[in-house]
Amino acid sequence: MKISVKELMSLDERFMRLAFEQARMAVTAGNEPFGAVLVKADEVMAVGQNKINTENDPTYHAETGLIRDYCHQTGVTDLSDYTMYTSCEPCVMCAGCMIWAKLGRMVYGISVKQLFSLLKEGTSDVFSQEDDRGISMPCSEIFARSSNKISVIGGVLEAEGIELYQSYISPSEE
Ligand SMILES: [Zn+2]
């Protein structure tokens, strides 16, 4: 049976909610609000969350950490049949990691651009606002330069995503 666009959309939303849940769990654990879910044939294969503080690993972003752990545990190094859901559009490191892992499809909640504009208006210093380590570049630009053309869908459950990041970045506005 062919899956309709509407059904695909609701699946994307379902998995995005799991990614948001991982992002909230990351905050509870003392990390930053980023979560990821790896799906194959509409089945969740693995979940991941940001662990930069608890692992003392500045590269332990949700997406890179998930890919590293999943591939290491399963022996799978080709993710072309997989979709990754991320609460926020991946950074340049994670987008690069997705290319190396041959990821097939990527779905994100809020864009890097939106995250940066929330940070600019932010009332707390959860991420240092003077911090220029983050590079505001759409992942599609990075994927476009690779031979692995990862298909990208952005803005899934965008309003919920914005709310999640807003409450972390500007808690007083709650
Ligand atoms: Zn990243």
Image (cartoon, rainbow, N blue to C red):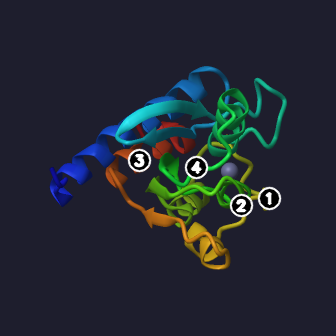
The reply to whether the residue tagged 2 has its Cβ within 8 angstroms of ligand 1 is: no
Amino acid type at mark 3: Gly
Circle 3 or circle 4, nearest the eye: 4
Amino acid type at mark 4: Leu
Badges 2 and 1: C-beta atoms under 8 Å apart?
no
Circle 3: is it few (<14), some (14-19), or many (20+) Cα within 10 Å? Answer: many
Q: CA distance from mark 2 to mark 3?
A: 23 Å
Write down the residue under mark 2: 96
Kindly state the secondary structure of the residue where label 1 is placed. Answer: loop
Residue at coordinates 80% horizontally, 26% vertically from top-left? Answer: 55
Kindly state the secondary structure of the residue where label 4 is placed. Answer: loop
Looking at the image, tell me whether mark 1 or mark 4 is earlier in sequence order: 4
Looking at the image, tell me whether mark 2 or mark 3 is earlier in sequence order: 2
Say which quadrant the C terminus sits in: top left
Q: Nearer the viewer, residue 159 or 34?
A: 34
Write down the residue under mark 1: 133
Circle 1: is it few (<14), some (14-19), or many (20+) Cα within 10 Å? Answer: few
| Label disc, if present, on residue 161 of the rendered structure | 3
Residue at coordinates 35% horizontally, 54% vertically from top-left? Answer: 156
Looking at the image, tell me whether mark 3 or mark 4 is earlier in sequence order: 4
Circle 2 or circle 3, nearest the eye: 2
Kindly state the secondary structure of the residue where label 3 is placed. Answer: helix
Looking at the image, tell me whether mark 2 or mark 1 is earlier in sequence order: 2
Write down the residue under mark 4: 79
Image location of residue 94, percent across then percent down: 68, 53
